[in-house]
Image (tube, helix red, strand yellow):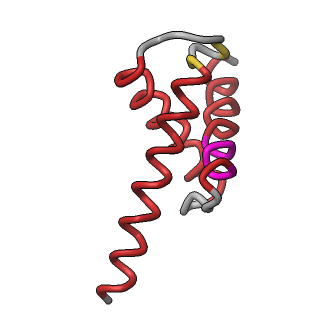
Amino acid sequence: MGFIWALIVGGIIGWLAGLIVGRDVPGGIIGNIIAGFVGAWLGTWILGDWGPHVADFAIIPAIIGAAVLVLLVSFIMRSVRKAS
């Protein structure tokens, strides 16, 4: 049950990051979950483990990390489309 809860929270974090940045995460729901997990890891690695925790995610660093990740991925995807 803990893994399913982590998937749900990771998806919500990725979705919120997409809303904050104003860009969609490529890959739909799976992309949101991946952005949430990788963004949480990135945010915790850079900003530390502070703020409220839900399903072992430090929410504030996770959302910030996911927003940075969404910006980077959208920038790379836009560059690849222009080069094609």
**Residue at position x 53%, y 44% in the image:** 67
- Expressed as whole percent of the image width and height from the top left, the position of residue 73 reads 42, 58
Q: For the C terminus, which image quadrant?
A: bottom left
> Is 46 inside the magenta-drawn segment?
no
| Front residue of 23 and 12 | 23
- Residue under the image location 64 percent in, 58 percent down: 22
**How many labels, in total?**
0
Q: Position of residue 24 (x, y in %)?
A: 62, 61
Q: Main secondary structure of the magenta part?
A: helix
**Is residue 36 placed above or below 41 in the rendered structure?**
below
Which stretch did the figure color magenta? 14-19
Extreme-left residue of the structure: 83
Direction from residue 52 to residue 37 in the image, left or right:
left
Residue 64 horizontal side relative to residue 84, left or right: right
Q: Is residue 36 left or right of residue 81?
A: right
Report x, y in % for residue 48: 42, 14
Residue 45, percent from left and from top = 35, 22
Residue lying at the far bottom of the rendered structure: 84
- Residue at image location 57% in from the left, 13% down from the top: 56
Return the residue nearer the eye: 27 or 14: 14
As drawn, 12 above or below 75: above
* Quarter where residue 9 is shown: top right
Quarter of the figure that contains the N terminus:
top right
